[in-house]
Amino acid sequence: MSEKGRIESASEATTLRLSLLLRCVRTLDAAGVRTISSSALAERFGLNSAQIRKDLAMFGEFGVRGVGYHVTELMSRLKEVMGLDRTRVVVIVGAGNLGQALADSRNFNGEGFTVAALFDVDGRKIGGRSRTVVLIRDASGIPVDAQQIGAEIGILAVPPDAAVAAAEALARGGVRAILNFAPVTVPPISDVIVKNMDLSFFLEGLSFQLARM
Amino acid sequence: MSEKGRIESASEATTLRLSLLLRCVRTLDAAGVRTISSSALAERFGLNSAQIRKDLAMFGEFGVRGVGYHVTELMSRLKEVMGLDRTRVVVIVGAGNLGQALADSRNFNGEGFTVAALFDVDGRKIGGRSRTVVLIRDASGIPVDAQQIGAEIGILAVPPDAAVAAAEALARGGVRAILNFAPVTVPPISDVIVKNMDLSFFLEGLSFQLARM
């Protein structure tokens, strides 16, 4: 399989492991650690050292024999691999409680991401601002505004019956990835990554674990 | 390995697959389908039929040779296995935008779950109600109130510096599973399942996929 083929086939599990690894490496960097071996990294954060080496090997060699990984290099390579070496513009559709909570969250305004606009259909909300002063715009302008803002990621925090139309409007505005929090499945849109976030999955998971306790 | 051992070792991936399977089976039931084979089920919903048989076999035999599964029986067995055959009481700590959005969401008030209370430290919010009339209570009463309400699952929608104390208060109130939406990791608490929901993981996943497009 070609290098490109291998990279494209990175699964969701790989993505989550890399995301976790990046958090661990940031912690080490903040603590002033300069170099670390895959086994020390595994031990310190409860990971699997063989899996770490396997995941990182997908993106070329960047460990040093007998030394392990240089922490700052590992951190910058991971960010690069994950596309976090630049800031992606996020827009949110739906300025209700959930949309505003996400617009103001640290999660969505950290390294790599910035929320640039909220959209809503409610005339009483349009023109207002969330707590972190994200402007609330008219949802009818999504295709034009998203394009102008340079939005790459869209988040749906709308009622279920508005989700598909909002996703299509974002796609027309050049958005290439959508995270859907509406309690309905948004079907695939060509050339757009759609991730349906069904929060009840997580509750059901807890219920399953409780039933096994 | 004993049956119990096998069941306890059900991974997070198994949990998600069972959750997905239950959704598919509900769809079939609503459409009036009476019986279905694992291969038809797999084809219709884009699943893996061998994996379906393997997952279900963990919980005993309930397919019928030559017929497949009886849809209503499959649905009730799945609910039972996942502990969804009764309603679990959920309480939410933090009545800000996120907490109120979750309290009012369909996801958290569907079959199997009901949000019984919101807690907050803000005197101006205490005594009020969310849109779906969940009462907002004083967070200082969490241990007593959670016990009295019979809460099994707690959700943290508080600022990061309040998360650990809120989790401990829930644990003292008899809560056995916690879903943490605060942007901080809550360390393990004995006899309590803690699931840290770091929403930026999902954004990073999209970024990684965008970088590969």
Image (spheres, coloured by chain):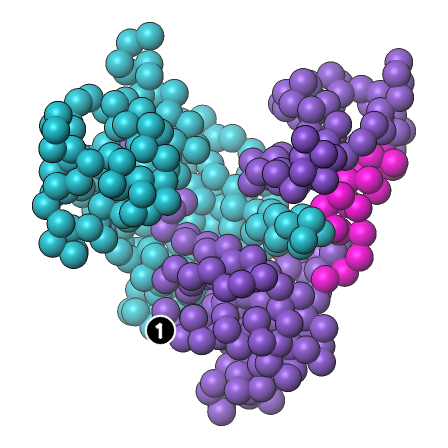
Chain colours: A cyan, B purple
The secondary structure type at the circle numbered 1 is helix
Q: Position of residue A156 (x, y in %)?
A: 47, 50
Question: Which is more toward the observer, B69 or B129?
Answer: B69
Circle 1: is it few (<14), some (14-19), or many (20+) Cα within 10 Å?
Answer: few
Residue B78 seen from this side: yes
At a point 28% along the width and 27% down the height, the residue shown is A53
Instruction: Please give left or right for residue A2 compared with residue A71 in the image.
Output: right
Magenta span has B79? yes
Quarter of the figure with residue B106: bottom right
Query: Which region shows up in magenta?
Result: B71-88
Residue at far bottom of view: B123
Tell whether B14 sits left or right of B156. right
Q: Which residue is mark 1?
A: B161
On the question of residue A121 being in view, the answer is no
Report the amino acid beneath label 1: Asp
Q: Residue at x 29, y 9 (%)?
A: A2
The chain containing the residue under callout 1 comes to B
Q: Position of residue B186 (x, y in %)?
A: 42, 63
